[in-house]
Amino acid sequence: MPKSKKEKLLHLFNNVARIAQTFGMRLSFDDQDRATISLPYNPDLDHGLGCTHGGAIATLLDNAGWFTCALAHRGDGWIATSQLSLHLLLPAEKTDLRARAEIIKSGKRQDVAEMRCWDANDNLVAHASGTFIYLENLPFEKLKES
């Protein structure tokens, strides 16, 4: 029986994407099909002052937006991030992080999403908006079963 698109996306991120494994990130979806990316505290992602590097936080936010938009499109086309605007609001010092996205405008070929990232104490540490392009002529490659 073929897997649902949601199952394919979960497999793609949680089992195939090397960056997710390297960082220790996990993807889940809530009941409204919004992607959440969780990142247990990883000292290998700290900058010199001991907080999680902004680039790692940007990666969380980008992936949350990407997977929310990917699930929203019916077809098997690829999604590409075409724009990402990031605001780092608080330092994330030795804490787990989670980012969640929500589509604020959906179109046939382009979506705009808002992403937020919280620490383990529910402090908002970053906010982003992104534009994601749907490329229907570039299908997902068939995923290998692991």
Image (spheres, rainbow, N blue to C red):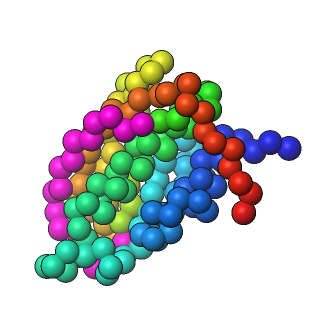
Q: Which residue is situated farthest in the right direction here?
A: 1
Q: Nearer the viewer, residue 52 or 82?
A: 82
Residue 100 location, x and y as percent? 40, 50
**Residue 99 seen in this snapshot:** yes
* Residue 46 as seen in the image, left or right of residue 40: left
Q: Which residue is situated farthest in the top direction here?
A: 108
Check residue 67 for magenta coloring: no
Residue 5 vertical position relative to residue 46 in the rendered view, above or below: above
Q: Quadrant of residue 32?
A: top right
Write the residue at 59% across / 59% down: 16
Residue 139 location, x and y as percent? 60, 33
Quadrant assignment for the N terminus: top right
Write the residue at 25% across / 71% down: 52
Number of marks in picture = 0
Residue 80 vertical position relative to residue 110 in the rendered view, above or below: below
Residue 146 location, x and y as percent? 72, 63
Question: Which region is colored magenta?
Answer: 80-96
**Residue 117 seen in this snapshot:** no
* Residue 116 as seen in the image, left or right of residue 18: left
Write the residue at 21% across / 47% down: 86
Write the residue at 30% across / 74% down: 45
Check residue 94 for magenta coloring: yes
